[in-house]
Every structure is written in C-alpha cells, then in structure tokens.
Amino acid sequence: MRNVRREAEAQRMASISEMWVVTTRPLALEGEMYEMLKTRLLKEETKFVYFIDSAAGESPFHDLWRRLNVEAPGKSLMLKQKLQCVLVPSSLCLYHYGICNPGQLARMFGRLIVYASEIPVGYLSMDSQQVSRAYHLLAPIYQRLNMEQEITTDYGKFRRVQTT
C-alpha cells in the first residue's frame, strides 16, 4: 500500500491527463493531495471529475471550489473546465477509487483508496478488469450529463454540480 504522501508524488510524476475520482467526499481538501490537485489544475492540463456521494459530498466539494477560487483569483473559468463534480447514489461510493486516463485503454489504470476512521491512509493498484468495469459504468452516465443537468438510471439519480 502506498501512503498518501507517496501517492501524491507518484501522481505528480505520472502522465495523467484526466482523473475520475469516486468517493464520499473530495480527498483533496487539505495537505499533499490538495497541493497536488491545485498544481495540476493551475499549471498542467489535467482534468478532474469527482463522482461524489449525493448524501455527503456536495458541501465539501463547494468548500474545495471556494478555496481554489480564493487562492487562484481570476481562474474560475479555467477551473470550471478542469474540475467537475457529479453527485451519485451513495451505493456507488461503497468503495473509493480513482480512474486515471479514463477511456484511454492503453493508459487507463486505477487506484483503490483505503480508509481508516474516515481518513485516507493509502492507495492500492486496482485490477484492470475492475477499472474497465467501473469505467464502462460511469462513461455513459458522464456523457449524458454533458448534455443534461440531471439523469435517472437503473442505479439511481445523478446530477452535475453547478459551480459559480
């Protein structure tokens, strides 16, 4: 298992153009993960999409959004294009993971996020079949949400969070 600090460094070094993170609330609210997210958003071409538990994650995402806007004044439009949030049914957040380079089959990989007492303590590599299944579940939902604000599927309701 790779600890949070080592994972942040590994992500900094990896060639990641986009990352989808499925979790109860954003992990990058502080510390190394926040600094890594801020750097990748402001200085690199990385896009982040958070698929967050609709019961618990909207408020922390808005907190993250506000903090980034305060620390990077005048960058709101760029942040809107590179940082998005989709509220998902709680049942999709039983496991917390990230899909790096979604849809880029030769470059797509996943990281399972391990928690202890609701605190992220480390990361494990996901099996490629797990990554593929997760991607194939989320991709059509995400594509539809690019055209609609809210959709209902067999899995439940999904809604894109509007940022200001």
Image (cartoon, rainbow, N blue to C red):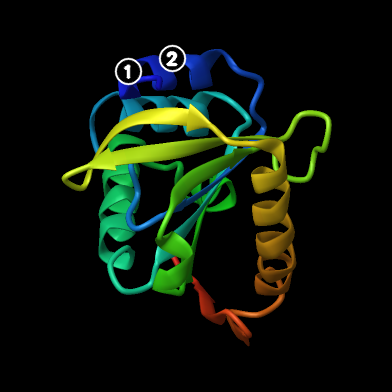
Distance from disc 1 to disc 2, alpha carbons, whole Å, reads 6 Å
Measured from the top left, where is residue 34 in percent x and y? 32, 32
- On screen, residue 93 versus residue 84, left or right, reads left
164 w.r.t. 157: above or below: above
21 w.r.t. 34: above or below: below
The quadrant in which residue 5 appears is: top left
Specify the label residue 5 is tagged with: 1
- On screen, residue 84 versus residue 154, left or right, reads left
Residue in view at x 72 percent, y 73 percent: 144
Furthest residue toward right? 106
Furthest residue toward left? 117
- On screen, residue 103 versus residue 60, left or right, reads right
Specify the label residue 122 is tagged with: none
148 w.r.t. 122: above or below: below
Residue in view at x 26 percent, y 57 percent: 60
Q: Quadrant of the N terminus?
A: top left
Mark 1 is on which residue type?
Answer: Arg
Q: Quadrant of the C terminus?
A: bottom left
- Neighbour class for label 2 at 10 Å: few (<14), some, many (≥20)? few
Q: Is residue 29 visible?
A: no
Measured from the top left, where is residue 62 in percent x and y? 31, 59
Residue at the disc numbered 2: 9
Q: Secondary structure at mark 1?
A: helix
The quadrant in which residue 102 appears is: top right
- On screen, residue 28 versus residue 152, left or right, reads left
Of 77 and 7, nearer the camera is 7
Residue in view at x 55 percent, y 13 percent: 13
Q: Is residue 130 visible?
A: yes
